Image (spheres, rainbow, N blue to C red):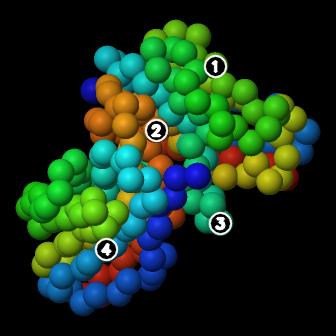
Amino acid sequence: DAGVIQSPRHEVTEMGQEVTLRCKLISGHNSLFWYRQTMMRGLELLIYFNNNVPIDDSGMPEDRFSAKMPNASFSTLKIQPSEPRDSAVYFCASTTGPHEKLFFGSGTQLSVL
Amino acid sequence: QKEVEQNSGPLSVPEGAIASLNCTYSDRGSQSFFWYRQYSGKSPELIMFIYSNGDKEDGRFTAQLNKASQYVSLLIRDSQPSDSATYLCAVGGGSNYKLTFGKGTLLTVNP
């Protein structure tokens, strides 16, 4: 099992540029979560999908952030335009059920200059 | 706003000692409780989960849950330097999939 796969591992960009983060779920998992982690705020849930449908996007900071799940195994998180305060580690994670364990990807370290 | 509180630490223990990590949560409807370990620069990995009041043991790890007090803890026996990491408490509620994480406790085990 390859686990949750995220790309890129590192992204450095300039303020105002569009950033797209990618995530491939573990086969057989039906729920996907996008988290953001910073020292100040810890691990924050941005959005989660169940069976490709967005269930709760209340954690998405603002309209500059959008997430899609075009099929059962793949998701993208887009930031447009990016700002320095978006700098963080972005994790995606997947699971099979509401009380089951969450498997995390390796994360994307985003730096917006 | 559901909250999960942890002491940020650092918690420092000598090798071989018992490390005790604590977590409180605000939502009385919470039903699932998890402990994740995160090494510096790595992603969180699950080490324990507990759903019922009482203790659950797995090797050197014991999770303890007290729903009346809204308290969950993790004990690490015979602590090793390799246990040095940040430990994240996560709490899930009801029928939804949403986990709320604490900010984590940094544990340092000194040789």
**Residues under numbered marks 3 and 1 in contact, where contact means CB atoms less than 8 Å apart:** no
Nearer to the camera, A1 or A75: A75
Give the residue at the far right of this rendering.
Answer: A16
Viewer-nearest of discs 1 and 4: 4
User: Please, is residue A59 above or below residue B60 in the view?
Assistant: above
Is circle 2 on the same chain as circle 1? no
Tell me the residue at 47%/28% (across/down): A32
Q: Which of the 4 image quarters holds residue A61?
A: top right
Is disc 1 placed on a helix, strand or loop? strand
Question: Would residue A36 appear left or right of A78 to someone viewing this image?
Answer: left
Spatial CA span between label 3 and label 2:
21 Å
Disc 4 and disc 3 in contact, CB within 8 angstroms: no
Q: Which amino acid, by three-letter code, is at mark 4?
A: Leu
Q: Residues within 10 Å of mark 2 (few under 14, many from 20)?
A: some
Q: Earlier in the sequence, mark 3 or mark 1?
A: 3
Q: Which residue is mark 1?
A: A68
Residue count near mark 3 (Cα–Cα under 10 Å), binned few <14, some 14–19, many ≥20: few
Q: Nearer the viewer, mark 3 or mark 2?
A: 2
Q: Amino acid at mark 2?
A: Lys
